[in-house]
Image (cartoon, rainbow, N blue to C red):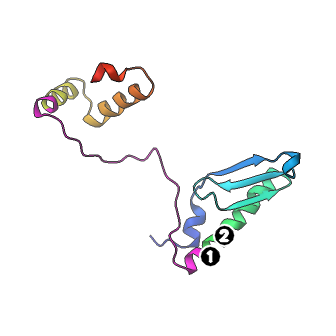
Amino acid sequence: MIKDKKYYLSIDYDIIVDKLSKEDGGGYFAYYKDIPSIMGDGGAKEEAIEDVKKAFENYLEVSMKNKDVIKEPIDITKKEKINITMPRDKLIGLDLFIKKHHTNRSKVLTNLTSMLLDNRIKMEELI
């Protein structure tokens, strides 16, 4: 895939819009979540978004001309392979468990991680 201006403009970058206080001049301030140095402003929210998108287009032109790396959004829902080490007897036990429950290692480890992060399981119970 060619990463040209059209490619980057088609990416769904998150734009953050904040309302400015009267002390800060009023209106709205917008920036790209993944590239906070690209900013825009306007009297209305839509104007700030339009302004930051124009700034992004200018950023792309300069960055591509200079052959700079252009940051793409991080997809936190994207799956990623990991390599873990565990005793063979535990791995065999895990595989027997997942076979019995018609699931897979990834699903069990993902669900266990979610339970830890949601405080449904205490770390002390696992170590």
Give the camera-side residue of 121 and 3.
Answer: 121
Q: Residue at x 35, y 34 (%)?
A: 110
- Drawn side of residue 35 relative to residue 121, left or right: right
Determine which quarter of the picture holds residue 63: bottom right
Q: Is residue 103 above or below residue 2?
A: above
Q: Residues within 10 Å of mark 1 (few under 14, many from 20)?
A: few
- Drawn side of residue 5 relative to residue 20, left or right: left
Residue 78 at x, y percent in the picture: 42, 47
* Secondary structure found at label 2: helix
Q: Residue at x 26, y 34 (%)?
A: 104
Magenta includes 71? yes
- Per the rendering, the mark at residue 61 is 1
1 and 2 marks in contact (CB < 8 Å): yes
Q: Residue at x 47, y 45 (%)?
A: 76
Give the camera-side residue of 121 and 94.
Answer: 121
Mark 2: amino acid? Glu
CA distance for labels 1 and 2: 6 Å
Residue 26 at x, y percent in the picture: 86, 50
Spot the residue most to the bottom: 65
* Secondary structure found at label 1: helix
Q: Is residue 91 above or below residue 15?
A: above
Q: Is residue 18 above or below residue 4?
A: above
Residue 39 at x, y percent in the picture: 70, 60
Q: Is residue 96 above or below residue 68?
A: above
Mark 1: amino acid? Glu
Q: Classify the position of the N terminus by image quarter.
A: bottom left
Residue 41 at x, y percent in the picture: 79, 58
Residue range corresponding to the magenta coloring: 62-91
Determine which quarter of the picture holds residue 58: bottom right
Q: Classify the position of the C terminus by image quarter.
A: top left
Q: Residue at x 79, y 53 (%)?
A: 46
